[in-house]
Image: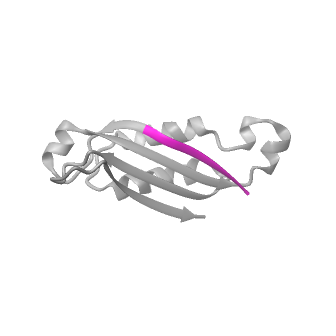
């Protein structure tokens, strides 16, 4: 079993329960960790035998572009696409962080993390 991480994918998106959040938008950071059997790729040196992190980045960018009220909903969509499109992934962990959230305080970010296994 191996682990592939794609860390701090920066996205500007329009998520939130407040109307202003869906109009003005905000900065987000997304972290994806997947576990898969990477033994074949370690021997073959072939991209088709591993998890392509370019593909993961593409999924994150597409799903973050779809407005949602809750970060949990966005993270679940990202995980669903990973499992649908990357068959060797056994486990996924997705963390979505809203940078400088509008919560009436000096808060660097708020984050949610979802984990799922096949």
* Residue at the far front in the pictured view: 106
Q: 69 and 32: which one is in front?
A: 32
- Residue 68 in the image: state x and y as whole percent: 29, 50
* Left or right: residue 40 compared with residue 110: right
* Left or right: residue 63 compared with residue 22: right
Image height of 52 relative to 78, above or below: above
Q: Residue at x 47, y 41 (%)?
A: 8
Q: Residue at x 75, y 49 (%)?
A: 38
Magenta stretch: includes residue 49 = no
Image height of 54 relative to 7, above or below: above
- Residue 116 in the image: state x and y as whole percent: 53, 63
Q: Which residues are magenta?
A: 1-9
**Residue 92 occupies which quadrant of the picture?**
bottom right
Q: Residue at x 51, y 62 (%)?
A: 115
Magenta-colored segment: predominant secondary structure? strand
* Left or right: residue 54 compared with residue 108: right
* Residue at the far right in the pictured view: 43
């Amino acid at each position: 079993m191996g682990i592939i991480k794609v860390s701090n994918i920066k996205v500007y998106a329009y998520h939130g329960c407040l109307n202003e959040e869906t109009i003005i938008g905000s900065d987000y950071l997304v972290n994806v960790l997947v576990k898969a059997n990477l033994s074949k790729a370690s021997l073959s040196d072939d991209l088709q035998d591993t998890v392509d992190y370019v593909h993961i980045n593409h999924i994150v960018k597409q799903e973050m572009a779809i407005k949602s009220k809750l970060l949990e909903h966005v993270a679940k969509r990202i995980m669903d696409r990973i499992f649908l499109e990357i068959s060797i992934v056994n486990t996924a962990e997705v963390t979505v962080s809203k940078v400088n959230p509008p919560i009436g305080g000096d808060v660097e970010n708020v984050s949610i993390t979802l984990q799922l296994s096949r």
